[in-house]
Image (spheres, rainbow, N blue to C red):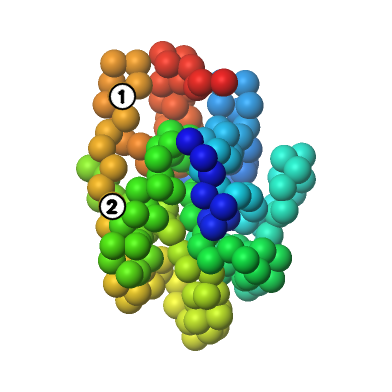
Amino acid sequence: MEPDENVVGIVLAGGRSSRMGGPDKCLQPLVGKPMVAHVLARLRPQVSDIVISANADGYAGFGLPVIADSLPAFPGPLAGIEAGLSWVAANRPGVAWAVTVPGDTPFVPDDLVSRLAEASRAAGAMAVARSGTGVHPVVGLWPVTMAGGLKAALASGMRRVSRWVEMQGAAQVLFPPSEIGGREVDPFFNVNQKDDLAEAESLFKRAPEPS
């Protein structure tokens, strides 16, 4: 698969990890490496560049730009998306799109960008992912030109990603379950609690990630 040179990846790792009990969940070990490293490995072949949206230390070792929210007090993933889009607009002026993926979704599909881009072109709008568990508004393909409007909306109190996506008339792309070790797994399975991390560990041991 060839990377899409017109898309930069934004990995969202700026949450508080409160349901994990405090530690930064995206940096928790999963089969021998930080969980976010699995996300990066799956996203890297699909995009021209990757940046990490994070508000904590610990991400410098990945050798990628780390972008903090422009607003204080952990305003949520929409602020991380805005920070990433603003970075792309300032630093990659030839790139028109950015794809966002949470840093706690280690099974993100390897055709995520191509399918979102196809749907976006057909609809003439941004596109977000959907699976059997519902819509995943933080997994989406965003026009970089949206950065300014999103920044203004955040300043006015907008916080819900789902509401912003709905306002943009986003297309939805259905992704089927992934088969891992004989089990059907939601491709956007996310690790929120320690039990989720243990389940992800078990799934990886059944079917190790390709090198």
| Residue 77 left/right relative to 180 | right
Instruction: State whether residue 102 is above or below residue 124.
Output: above
Q: Position of residue 30 (x, y in %)?
A: 56, 26
**Dot 1 amino acid type:** Glu
Query: Judging from the image, what secondary structure is the residue with disc 1 in?
Result: strand
Instruction: State whether residue 196 is above or below residue 209.
Output: below
Q: Position of residue 59 (x, y in %)?
A: 71, 45
Of the pair 67 and 122, the residue shown nearer to us = 122
Instruction: State whether residue 145 is above or below residue 132.
Output: below
Can see residue 141?
yes
**Dot 2 amino acid type:** Val
Quarter of the image for the C terminus: give it. Answer: top right
Can see residue 73?
no
Q: Position of residue 142 (x, y in %)?
A: 46, 64
**Foreground: disc 1 or disc 2:** 2
Q: Which corner quadrant of the image does residue 141 belong to? A: bottom left
Question: Which residue sits at x=35%, y=21%?
Answer: 180
Question: Which residue sits at x=62%, y=66%?
Answer: 94
Residue that carries the numbered disc 1 in the rendered image:
179
Of the pair 132 and 121, the residue shown nearer to us = 121
Query: Judging from the image, what secondary structure is the residue with disc 2 in?
Result: strand
Of the pair 27 and 193, the residue shown nearer to us = 27
- Mark number displayed over residue 83: none
Of the pair 63 and 134, the residue shown nearer to us = 63
Question: Which residue sits at x=72%, y=47%?
Answer: 64
Residue that carries the numbered disc 2 in the rendered image:
173
